[in-house]
Image: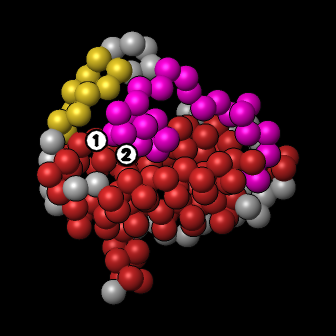
Amino acid sequence: MNKDYIQTLYRYNQWANARILDTAAKLSPEQFLTPSEHPHRYLRGVLVHTLFAEWIWRKRWSGESPTTRLKPEDFPTFESLRTRWQEEESELMKFVEEVSEEKINAPFHYTSTEGVKYENILCESMAHVVNHGTQHRSEAAAILTELGFSPGDLDMILFRRKKL
């Protein structure tokens, strides 16, 4: 996989996340915490899980192996979550822009939060993070739609058409 493609994936990821977050910003504080039947129980849970994945993988790619997780309780309001997400997005996009072509195709090592050691190829784990985000954005979109606030289509081809 090459750096240009990885950068395109991450610009798409950024665009799709923004659509979800911009829509979530329209919710009342009560709606943000409304229980749902989805795996992370409510919108805040889905969004925190998605942010956590982006954060922990970026840390791993940078040679760190965090032992803690971000938790929904860490973000009592949507605004606190969005602020943290903007900080992480800045760090993540900086990593994506600065990573070398050589490093993208090389293995890296990390330890999971459970203490298990792994080796992965960087580009494969970077693709995984975008794919993982797609799954959870779809859950967030379903919750938002159930609350009457659809974020609209999140397809990568729509992102590409808007950027061409």
Percent of width and height locating residue 139? 54, 47
Which residues lie in the magenta part?
53-79
- Quarter residue 113 falls in: top left
Q: Is residue 57 visible?
A: no
Percent of width and height locating residue 9? 33, 62
Determine whether label 1 and label 2 are within 8 Å by CB.
yes
User: Which residue shows up at 46% across the image and 44% down it?
Assistant: 54
Percent of width and height locating residue 95? 38, 53
Secondary-structure class at tag 2: helix
Looking at the rendered structure, the kind of residue marked 1 is Ser
In the rendered view, does 18 fall on the left or right side of 92?
A: right
**Residue 54 on the magenta segment:** yes
For marks 1 and 2, give the CA distance: 6 Å
User: Which residue shows up at 68% across the image and 42% down it?
Assistant: 44
Q: What residue is shown with label 1?
A: 125
**Residue 56 on the magenta segment:** yes
Taking the view exactly as shown, the residue that stands out farthest to the bottom is 164
Mark number displayed over residue 129: 2
Mark number displayed over residue 86: none
User: Which residue shows up at 67% across the image and 64% down it?
Assistant: 23
Q: How many discs appear?
A: 2
